[in-house]
Amino acid sequence: MNIFNKSSVSGLQEANGVTVEPVITVSSEIKATVSDRVPFHTQNIEYGTDGGTLIAFIARANAEDISEANKKGFLLMFDKNIKPGTYDVTDSGFPFREAYYFEMGTIPGFTTSFHYTPQSGTFSVETIENSERKLHYKIGFNFKGKDNRNEELKIEGAATLIVFTRPM
């Protein structure tokens, strides 16, 4: 599944007279504590881009669970030129287009998800590298998130997000 339903890479390269897209390698992880839950940890992280500067990471834990009842994860979407700093989630300049924790749930014949969007708290951003060949960010987060039923969770953790773009 591509996050943006487009090519994951905007640039094309020539190889033996044939236009090919660069190869993307993702080396990332997210660790978090979520109130009233077991610790969250995953390296199952999908990267996507809109072909411009908007990038997204979807992190999934327990993705192999066929019942759908144990899947959980994070979505972080932001401009790849994000400025380092600490951001309050209520500020008008909060740089994340989307940022939330999610959980899947089931009843027989039906699957749904609960998205816990930040209501208060902070995100800190460190940009290690932003080049044509490599994106590398460290993002810390400490927020209270609510879903559409007003259930609140306290979520704290860190993401190391590294993407390599290599020629074929």
Image (cartoon, grey):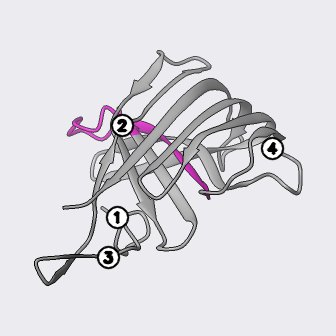
Q: Which residue is mark 4?
A: 89
Residue displayed at 36% across by 66% down: 8
Q: Earlier in the sequence, mark 1 or mark 3?
A: 1
From the viewer's perspective, is residue 133 above or below residue 11? above
Rounded to the nearest angstrom, the CA distance separating label 4 from label 2 is 26 Å
Task: Mark 4 or mark 1: name the one nearer the start of the chain.
Answer: 1
Q: Of marks 2 and 3, which one's residue comes earlier in the chain? A: 3
User: What residue did someone put label 1 on?
Assistant: 2
Question: Which element type, helix, strand or loop, lies under badge 1?
Answer: loop
Instruction: Name the residue tied to disc 3.
Output: 12
Q: Amino acid at mark 2?
A: Ser
Q: Secondary structure at mark 2?
A: loop
Mark 4 and mark 2 lie on one chain; the one further toward the N terminus is 2
User: 76 or 35: which is nearer to us?
Assistant: 76
Location of residue 40 in the rendering, given as x and y in whole percent from the top left corner: 46, 23
Badge nearest the viewer, 1 or 2: 2
Q: Nearer the viewer, mark 4 or mark 2?
A: 2
Q: Quadrant of the C terminus?
A: bottom left
For residue 104, which quarter of the picture? Answer: top left
Quarter residue 149 falls in = top right
Q: Which residue is mark 2?
A: 27
Determine crowd level at label 3: few under 14, some 14-19, many 20+ residues with C-alpha closer than 10 A.
few
